[in-house]
């Protein structure tokens, strides 16, 4: 049953074996509990922490991945500091002392618990998350300007540049480059926000020895930009400066976790009918790790 569930969708499994999907979930949970590698928390040096929504109503799972193997090693319901505390309780102080780098977004509860339980580990903030904060700031400026200019031709131009402003210059089509040029000539504030976003993205192309200077200059520019959303972002990145630079220093990100989250999204559809977090967690371990599930033939 576990092999079938890993290879087939819900409808195919239930039609083939003629049992309820809830029963399939129970079987999968038992098989995973029996076959999951008990040593998966050994030899952890570089890990990633992320959250994924599994149901409506603020229902989340916290996932921890071993970057060396690209596989999840620990999953539990919730995204609080107490949730990650359960991981460190299971890990134990000796193995926690081996952690060298932890990648994550700027989640306060995750940061606090890692600093408390593994103070020697360097926290590296995911580059994608940092650039996303800048993208959000650009879109906030664009919406504000479009609202202030409502009813004018300039507002129509801004409304049509949402995706253009999010793209990197090298990815722009000829039409999008024309749109960007119109923004530059019509609204300097939005264009300045776009340049700030792009200059922050360039930070991740810097060598580790050059990145601190580049970030310092960017923070100065953002603070004097007179754009509230970027002034706020500069304050956030100043607070988390070392974690931003550590991601560049070690060349790490939460990219593998984002890829895993994509697979989990597909599993959520396949596992429709599993009403508990534990059933979905079992499915994740079944389908996203190399559990030794052998057919009896």
Image: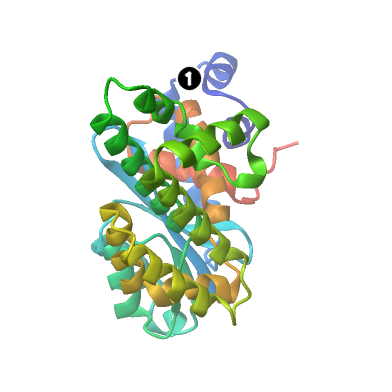
Judge whether 6 appears above or below 170 on screen: above
Residue 79 location, x and y as percent?
30, 54
Where residue 89 sits, quadrant-wise, is: bottom left
Q: In this rendering, would 77 be left or right of 6?
A: left
Q: Residue furthest front?
A: 185
Judge whether 54 appears above or below 50 on screen: above
Q: Residue at x 27, y 60 (%)?
A: 232
Q: Residue at x 45, y 42 (%)?
A: 29
* SS of the residue under disc 1: loop
Judge whether 80 appears above or below 43 on screen: above
In which quadrant is the N terminus drawn? top right
Q: In this rendering, would 184 be left or right of 142?
A: right
Where residue 93 sits, quadrant-wise, is: bottom left
Residue 73 location, x and y as percent?
50, 60
Q: Residue under label 1, please give it.
A: 19
Colour mapping used in the image: rainbow
In this orientation, does residue 8 appear?
Answer: yes
Q: Residues within 10 Å of mark 1 (few under 14, many from 20)?
A: few
Q: Residue at x 35, y 27 (%)?
A: 155
Q: So how many labels did they put on this image?
A: 1
Q: Is residue 144 or residue 289 the one in the foreground?
A: 144
Residue 12 location, x and y as percent?
58, 18
Residue 291 location, x and y as percent?
61, 50
Judge whether 218 appears above or below 19 on screen: below
Q: Residue at x 43, y 20 (%)?
A: 20
In which quadrant is the C terminus drawn? top right
Q: Is residue 271 or residue 58 the one in the foreground?
A: 58
Where residue 251 sits, quadrant-wise, is: bottom right
In this orientation, does residue 267 appear?
Answer: no
């Amino acid at each position: 049953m576990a092999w079938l569930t890993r290879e087939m969708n819900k409808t195919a499994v239930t039609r083939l074996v003629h049992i309820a999907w809830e029963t399939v979930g129970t079987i999968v949970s038992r098989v995973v509990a029996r076959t999951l590698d008990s040593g998966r928390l050994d030899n952890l040096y570089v890990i990633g922490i992320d959250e994924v929504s599994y149901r409506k109503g603020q229902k989340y799972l916290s996932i921890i991945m071993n970057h060396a193997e690209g596989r999840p090693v620990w999953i539990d319901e919730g995204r609080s500091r107490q949730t990650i505390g359960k991981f460190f309780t299971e890990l134990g102080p000796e193995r926690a002392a081996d952690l060298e780098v932890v990648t994550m977004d700027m989640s306060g509860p995750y940061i606090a618990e890692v600093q408390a339980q593994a103070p020697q580990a360097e926290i590296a903030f995911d580059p994608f998350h940092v650039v996303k904060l800048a993208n959000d700031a650009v879109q906030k400026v664009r919406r504000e300007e479009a609202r202030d200019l409502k009813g004018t031709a300039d507002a129509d131009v801004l409304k049509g540049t949402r995706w253009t402003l999010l793209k990197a210059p090298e990815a722009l089509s000829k039409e999008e480059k024309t749109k960007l040029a119109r923004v530059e000539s019509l609204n300097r504030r939005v264009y300045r926000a776009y340049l700030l976003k792009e200059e922050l993205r360039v930070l991740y192309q810097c060598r580790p020895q050059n990145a601190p200077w580049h970030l310092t200059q960017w923070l100065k520019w953002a603070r004097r930009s007179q754009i509230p959303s970027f002034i706020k972002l500069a304050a956030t990145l100043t607070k988390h400066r070392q974690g931003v630079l550590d991601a560049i220093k070690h060349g790490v990100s939460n990219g593998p976790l984002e890829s895993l989250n994509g697979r989990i999204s597909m599993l959520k559809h396949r596992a429709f009918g599993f009403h508990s977090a534990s059933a979905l967690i079992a499915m994740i371990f079944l389908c996203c790790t190399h559990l030794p599930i052998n057919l009896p033939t």
